Image (spheres, coloured by chain):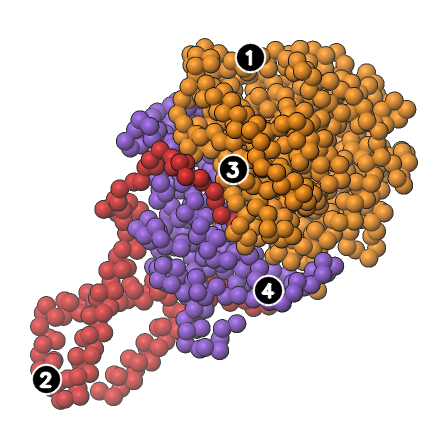
Amino acid sequence: MIDVLIVGGGGAGLRAAIAVAETAPELTVAVVSKVYPMRSHTVSAEGGAAGVIGIDDSLDEHCYDTVSGGDWLCDQDAVEAFVREAPRELIQLEHWGCPWSREPDGRVAVRPFGGMKRLRTWYAADKTGFHLLHTLFQTTLRHPWIRRYDEWYVTSLVVDDGRVHGVVALDLRTGRVEAIPARAVVLATGGCGRVFPFTTNAAIKTGDGMALAYRAGAPLKDMEFVQYHPTGLPFTGILITEAARAEGGWLLNRDGYRYLQDYDLGTPTPTPKLRSMELGPRDRLSQAFVHEQDKGRTIDTPYGPVVHLDLRHLGAAKIDARIPFVRELCRSYQNLDPATDLIPVRPVVHYMMGGVHTDLDGATTIAGLYAAGETACVSINGANRLGSNSLPEILVFGRRAGLAAAAFARSHREGEPPAVRSQGDDERRRLERARDGSSVGSSGGERIADLRERMQHTLEGAAGIYRTGDALAKAVDTLADLCERAGEARVEDTSATFNTELITLLELRAMLDVARTIVACALGREESRGAHQRVDFPARDDDAYLAHSLVHRAPDGTPSVGLMPVTITCWPPGERVYGR
Amino acid sequence: MTTARPPGHEEARPYVRPRDRWWFARRRSLAVFVLRELTSVLVAWTVAYLLLLLGAVADGTTERFAALAARPWMVALNVLALAATAFHAVTFLNLAPKATVVRLDGWRVPAWMIQGGNHTAWLAVSALLAYLVLRSS
Amino acid sequence: MAAETIRLDVARYRPEEDAEPVLQSYEVPLRPDWAVLDGLAHIKDHLDGTLSFRWSCRMGICGSCGMDVDGEPRLTCGTFLAEYGAGPVRIEPLKGFPVIRDLVVDIDGFLAKLSSVRPWLVREGEEPPLTAEYAQTPAQLDAYKQYSMCINCMLCYSACPVYVLDPDFLGPAAIALAQRYNLDSRDMDDRFDVLNLEEAVWGCTFVGDCTRVCPKHVDPAEAIQRYKVTAALRSVLPWSGR
Ligand SMILES: Cc1cc2nc3c(=O)[nH]c(=O)nc-3n(C[C@H](O)[C@H](O)[C@H](O)COP(=O)(O)OP(=O)(O)OC[C@H]3O[C@@H](n4cnc5c(N)ncnc54)[C@H](O)[C@@H]3O)c2cc1C
Ligand code: SF4
Ligand code: FES
């Protein structure tokens, strides 16, 4: 029997695994992941990871930037713990070999980032997540007793009497469905950007962990807060990192005008100014784009309207030294060179502020079940995450969740309850039916991809950058209908070996559950805050909504939304001021 | 970290492609590679030949050796061996920048410079040797 | 006007029914900004849901999508369909690896090789407290940076004739990874025991195709040749061990 079973081999999952292996060598720990760990989405993060090290910086200032950036919806005790532990986690990564970029004297270098008042973002050129994930993965290889289930897809949690007892997972290679009993389970399954059509997120980001917890009875929190990143490439959704603006890039409309100055984000200066203009927070920048579009000042392309990101004045040498990956991506995926050409960009869905509701140690409401990383919502990101806060978040809370899960496993030594076997058997029968088509008839039913497209466009239409009550209410019905239809979607592939079509269907069902919570929470919050902007309720309303949305799954499968107070310690709600 | 695949989880038979006997003919770089491997035989012959010459000089049978060396097939073989040795040497020197990374004040010396330098040095040494040998005769 | 299309000849292997891979043809739209991977995704979404392949990031960084495209190992997310003119384009699983299904190959052997070179920072003594980093100048970072860029896509193995003939050859990416740590000023190991072997650096006959196909300019061939020099020196000069 496994003591600590971690679902997810991204940054959060691997950090948790190392924490257990290093502090509790007597416990067995396993990492189950639907892709090989180094393929996890953390690998795509580009810009950097925030942690206070400068002498002119302070923990308080990082807290304030985070809290105001999150439009006061962050839990401030969580922010304080996060900001305090982030630097030591980044140094720990350095001690494990992470190739951070350096100052001439050998110290770690830091760069400015959107919404941050000081230079505190550590970076490894513009492949920070890649180096971070590979460093973590290679460090786990020192611990041969961390057991790995590579390319196993977790289909459900085994929960009995309010306590988790393991998971049921499908081995892609053989098609076998197996119950894996465990004393504690950590969900580190990443975000759910794929519920939207245009996203920087990888194909694997389908919100599985959120759906697993939600179906097992744990509530999700703040699901209406979806971050749009202002600069994605139009067709592919490939991210052009914020570091491009931090190094001095400008956003221009069709007239070559730095339009952000029209949206209370400061006045243009030739070199970047912190918390101003292009270095404002992501929600405000993405909203400014929509206003430009309404004014007819964006540029039309086959993939919709865009504005331009201008890096030409930085020169090839600086681009190659600081943001070489941006140049590589533009050249190989967009056929242009940022040293001489303007880059077309548009806002794209990037990050999920919401997730499985947890406390500061990653504990959910189900005993023995923990969550960390993008899939969780400890609540340091509030209504809008600041760029470069999420990589340190997965480290800080990955470690905390790992340690808490180890402690839980140590104090709960009883054996495997019969529920594990029986739930495993049920799940196996259910999946085999879906695979051999006997539940639906292989010729009947709709195509998975068609349903997925419908869902994505429903979400974009109703829960995009600007939202209205009417559109959201309609989306509630559309999604409920899609959910039913997904129950009978067509699976043509009957093979047991590496059946990716079956996985695609399971992912679609997870996304639909998550999508319904996003829309329900967005409908419930009748105010505008951070990334959640209601055209019909344009103002922030602290009296009614300085609170988290908490969404449970009702017995009939519909989401039911409630509110939960926000923890305020030192920073009472104020106005968000940028560029002034 | 180790991978877990419990007993009973052997997948349906993966396909292993049978060995392709003409794999080296499929791509130019592979053909060059095989050619280079084959030149080793001739390089070895050159070494043996030079040893024979040394032996002959040592016990004064240079005349018999010269007669042998003048046979047409022997001349043909040696011309071939010279070509092979040259090919081997050139490709060898072209590898050099891969094995030696030269940095001058943070600037990495590019491969063509190292290759050029090697070839120049090789020519210079050959010229010197030729000069010494031809002068003494 | 009918939209332009291109034919993809895709290798199919379903172990339950096929004795060996067979090519299956599909017509997909030919769009200037479509990568080979977009063509495969179009097949899976709209033509034939049973086709299996791996992909994730679609930005050349996760290393999942390596396949053999018209006889060359390529990242399919970074290879435009338009490169192949009017087609057809042949898409097969990466050569040199056992095929699990369709375009999916077995990479466990590769991972075992990576693990075998001690790919982590080896230090002696106690770890200092987490208050300060180890110093490393930009020049010291540059000394190994290139070898740290490997995305484990395995294209280099697929291109390597030594590996294709001898699956036990440690191979380009694993040796480059060892060198990534060897050349790191913070590391205190030289991995001599795992690299100075016939099955490791000495197996390399320097074809150089690994470097040619590497999408991340890691230059594994260089890493291997440099270690040969290191190993030779260390064997001759006992004190030259670091
Ligand atoms: C393009 C891009 C750039 C970014 N840049 C930055 C940046 O510069 N700075 C910053 O701070 N943040 C950045 N972020 C955000 C940050 O990268 C992510 O929030 C973070 O990496 C998430 O890590 P994670 O460990 O939670 O999840 P992931 O890395 O997504 O890992 C999820 C893991 O869960 C596994 N999994 C999921 N479902 C299942 C299942 N059903 N069964 C088994 N396993 C499963 C997956 O296999 C995977 O291993 C960026 C994000 C994107 C998209
Ligand atoms: S060395 Fe290059 S080709 Fe080989 S696995 Fe790494 S990135 Fe891929
Ligand atoms: S899909 Fe990630 S490298 Fe191609």
Residue on which disc 2 sits: B63
Q: Colour of chain C?
A: purple
Contact, mark 1 vs mark 3 (Cβ under 8 Å): no
Contact, mark 4 vs mark 2 (Cβ under 8 Å): no
Tag 3 secondary structure:
loop
Residue on which disc 1 sits: A485
Q: Residue at x 72, y 30 (%)?
A: A365
Q: Residue at x 38, y 63 (%)?
A: C197
Please tell me in which quadrant of the rendered image residue B81 appears. Answer: bottom left
Q: Nearer the viewer, residue C233 or C241?
A: C241
Above or below — where is A24 with respect to A34?
Answer: below
Picture mark count: 4
Decide: few, some or many residues near mark 3? Use Cα within 10 Å; few <14, some 14-19, many ≥20. many
Q: Is residue A476 left or right of residue A575?
A: left
| CA separation in Å, label 2 and label 1 | 97 Å
Residue A54 in the image: x percent, y percent?
Answer: 79, 55
Residue on which disc 3 sits: A35
Residue on which disc 4 sits: C123
**Quadrant (top left, top right, bottom left, bottom right) of the N terminus of chain A:** top right
| Chain with colour orange in the figure | A
| CA separation in Å, label 1 and label 4 | 57 Å
Badges 3 and 4, same chain: no
Badges 4 and 2, same chain: no
